[in-house]
Structure formats: C-alpha cells, structure tokens
Image: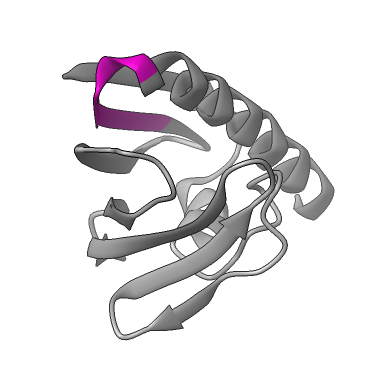
Amino acid sequence: MARIVLEEKLPYPTDSVWAIIGNITRCDWVPAVDSISLTGDIRSFTMAGIGEVQEKIIACDNKAKLLQYSAIKTPSNVEHHMATIQLTSQGDSCSFSWTVEIKPDAYADSIEHAMGVSLDALKQVLAKEN
C-alpha cells in the first residue's frame, strides 16, 4: 500500500482554510469536479477522465479541523483508499497536512499529482477570498 503525504504551511488563518475544506460539498478547489452531492455520509461526484466516484465521509470534525474520507466506489479496481486532511493553527497561518493511503500502489503517482493540483487550486481560492 502506498502512502502519500502532502504538507504545507499556508499564510491564511485556519478558520479560513477550514471554511473551504470543511464544506464537504464545495468543489471549487478540486479541479475536474463540477459538483458534489451528499446523501447521508456518502459524497458523490464525477471527475473528468476518471468517472463517477463515491466517498464515505469518516470524519468531518469542525473543532479538530479534520476531514477523513474513503473512496468506496470508483471506476477502477481500487482496493483501499483512505484520505485525511488535518489543519493546525500556527498563529495567523495554518499547517495543512493531507495524507492518502492507496492500494494498489500503481495509483500513487496519479493521486499525488491530483493532490498537488488541488492544493494549488485551494491556494488560488484562498487568495481570492482573503
């Protein structure tokens, strides 16, 4: 199983970043996703080039600024997927940590690329809103 970790200090308050990350139907920071629907704890969307994806929201903790989710339906043969985004306050800035476990390992490079693109888009959204 591959484990991908993306960490960065963002020059924005934790609450500003969480307002985007913690809104689990918000997709303007995730390229290739036009809309997200939520039924109970299942988040559904279609990604360009990938197809329909469903994720189970494991945790969306506003106090701890923690989002954890697992892909439960994908068009490919993903055996395991678990993602965790954790925000930590650092004064007027925020420590952003995104960890993904994926199996089979063959998907690690594309997941890591998608995470980087999404983080870049998140920074663009934050720059516009702050």
| 57 left or right of 1 in image | right
129 drawn magenta: no
Q: Position of residue 32 (x, y in %)?
A: 71, 47
Question: Where does the image place residue 80, in percent across and percent down from the top left?
Answer: 19, 38
How far from the left and from the top, in percent, is residue 125?
74, 47
Color scheme of the displayed model: one colour
Q: Is residue 122 above or below residue 103?
A: below
Q: Quadrant of residue 53?
A: bottom left
- Give the camera-side residue of 75 and 36: 75
Main SS category, magenta section: strand
Give the residue at x 28% y 38%: 78
Q: Residue at x 71, y 56 (%)?
A: 28
Give the magenta-colored segment's residue range. Answer: 96-106
Q: Residue at x 35, y 15 (%)?
A: 106
Residue 113 higher or lower than 78, as above or below: above
Residue 129 % position (x, y): 77, 54
Can residue 24 be seen here? no
Residue 57, picture quadrant: bottom left
Q: Taking the image as drawn, is residue 93 in sight?
A: yes
Q: Residue at x 60, y 39 (%)?
A: 12
Front-lying residue, 69 or 81? 81
* Horizontal side, residue 86 vs residue 74: left or right: left
